Image (tube, rainbow, N blue to C red):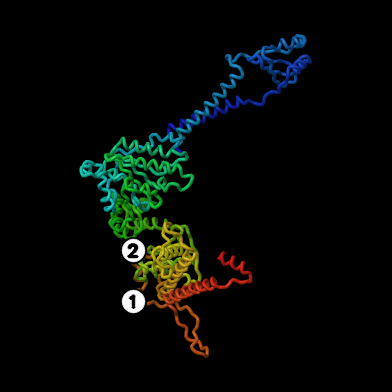
Amino acid sequence: MRFSGNRRWLLLAAVALVAVGAYLLTTLVGSSDPERTDLTHLMGEIRAGQVDEITVGSSGTSLEILMADGTERSGSLPAGQSLTALMTEAEIPSSQWPAIYAEPGGGGLGDGTGFMVRLMVVGLIFVVIILLMRRMMPGGFGGGGRKNRFTPIPAGQSPVTFDDVAGSAEIKHEVSDIVDFLREPERFRTVGAHIPHGLLLVGPPGTGKTLLAKALAGEANANFFSVSGAEFVELYVGVGASRVRELFKKARELEPAIIFIDEIDAIGRRRGRSDNSSEYDQTLNQILVEMDGFDERSNIVVIAATNRADVLDNALLRPGRFDRKVYVELPDREARRAILNVHARGKPIAGDVNLDEIASRTAGLTGADLSNVVNEAAILAGRDSQPAINMAHMAEALERTIAGPARAGRRFSEHERRVVAYHEAGHALVTHVLPYSDTVRKVSIVARGQAGGFTMITPEEDRGLWTRTQLEQRLAGLLAGMAAEEIVFEEVTTGSSNDLEQATSIAASMVQRYGMGRRFGLLSAGNGTTPPLSPQSTYAAEQEAMDIVSDAHELALEIIHEHREDLERLAAKLIEVETIEGSELDDLVSRKSEPFAPRRSVPTPVASRSSGPGGGTGATEPVTARQRSGLRRVAGTAAAALSVVGRLFQREAPQPGNDRRQSSKTARAR
């Protein structure tokens, strides 16, 4: 932890005060008190010559006694009595009196007064230490360190404009009237319009919501307050609400102003979730009150960003507070090309760099991911001491962003390299052959991240909708790696764990969300807002998802059997060169002449059929994946029907036993 100059001196002062306090506390408590003695016993010891000297304290009542054997004792005199008078009354000869000394005066302060003074000094030191800690802590106690927390970017000094927000033409058009309203409010007021109080930006992380808010403030020439929802959350109830009041008070003093609250779901969740949410609820209530307090001539706009709009309180989303909700989605291919242009601006780019090709390979990446790709490429160019960023740097940066950096130090045995090669070759082969699958861009057995190899598969164009056929072929491509291991090595490895996770998620969504199940029906499990499914429905959905995955697995086995030579050729090439570009697959894999024709089934033996009364055995016929799926559906339907019939018979069966009363009780219990 690094401290600024002022904080360093405050820390040193606190340490010094702690040291002084410890010293004073030590002197206050002191060591163990000397042994005390009563006056009668003391007079006897003086008469016996066992006392060498006595020191009378400044108060005149305390005694410090030094014995002849060197031990020390203490005692006290009654108020108004003197030691000499007591020894005279005890008839002790003056020749036997010990040496008597008087302690020097302490400025008129007695023992009790000195004790109180030292106690007050220690208390003062602790008060000073608490005040110093309050100043040094970011939040302090009760928000003491937040007085100048909300410092805006002054109007006209925001370095971001709409030119820096690429690929968001529709979103910029949607918010442009807010810019016009902040610039020329009278133009809208003459026709009876009032400025929108709030703008909610909803989208995945990294899509540019914060950048868009900054650009809006730069275009509108308004003061820009940027805070996070977590900054209003504190342990003490009421602190967050006071900070909200402080923020909106400063914004009103500096109109026109834009207040940007990032991650508003930290304080804007539905109220009354639990007994411990009173601080969150009060903070949200204060935001609602402040937004209701805007009058028609107010030039303040509140912009909030979140990727969890489903958890926000309904009162926050109603018109009059957040009047508009803008969805910031993942960029399409054209938008990705524009974003790459923005981030490549000012960087030396070689002539062989094709940003269109990079944009086509980056489907599903956000603007932040694309910025990271360009920056990683620049780092790689600097590492290689190159004067410009070339296409090889861009490709490597893209693979590092998607799959992680290459791990040259990870060494596989020769058998493991063959397994990885056949696994990735299976993915590439099945995906390349199936007509509705996406395009294979690259196949590699170079270890990256946690994976021993990877197959880069991206669509030719951005897709908004998926058909059942496309998802089934996507599943076949995911399971093709395991299928290749089964066929070649007659064994499977742990390398398919991620493939199985994706396949399970896709198959479950097909049945429970997209209505693509044939037996489950058109029910939807939803996203938590729909009623929960019954155990029977959940079991039926799981069974149908298992059937879909099994069909995809059989399809992958079928294709690999048909293209076994292509698989061997592709795997051998991978073992030799480690990386194959997608353009090379057409030379290594032969496509089927009739991609829509029914495929041959995997030659799996089935139960033999009787050819006649004599019990002869007929020829074994292959069963296709579609036939297997149909047989499973028929069997599942029959089992369900038998279960229903069995329950009906069980319900109408007579009660056993002769006791009529017991039988009626059992019937009522049922």
Relative to 358, does residue 60 appear above or below in the rendering? above
Badge number at residue 594? 1
Badge number at residue 465? 2
Q: Between disc 2 and disc 1, whose residue precedes?
A: 2
Find numbered disc 2 in the image and state the secondary structure of the residue it sits on: loop
Left or right of residue 163, residue 561 in this image: right
Direction front: furthest residue: 660
Relative image position of residue 409 (x, y in whole percent): 47, 57
Residue at 37% x, 47% y: name it: 315
Q: Nearer the viewer, mark 2 or mark 1?
A: 2
State the image quarter where residue 121 is shown.
Answer: top right
Q: How many marks?
A: 2
Quarter of the image with the C terminus in it: bottom right
Q: Is residue 380 visible?
A: no
Q: Residues within 10 Å of mark 1 (few under 14, many from 20)?
A: few
Residue at 34% x, 56% y: name it: 394
Relative image position of residue 16 (x, y in whole percent): 52, 28
Find numbered disc 1 in the image and state the secondary structure of the residue it sits on: loop
Residue type highlighted by circle 1:
Glu
Relative image position of residue 437 (x, y in whole percent): 36, 68
Residue at 40% x, 46% y: name it: 268
Relative to 442, does residue 345 appear above or below in the rendering? above
Relative image position of residue 58 (x, y in whole percent): 63, 15
Q: CA distance from mark 2 to mark 1?
A: 26 Å
Q: Are marks 2 and 1 in contact (CB under 8 Å)?
A: no
Residue type highlighted by circle 2:
Leu
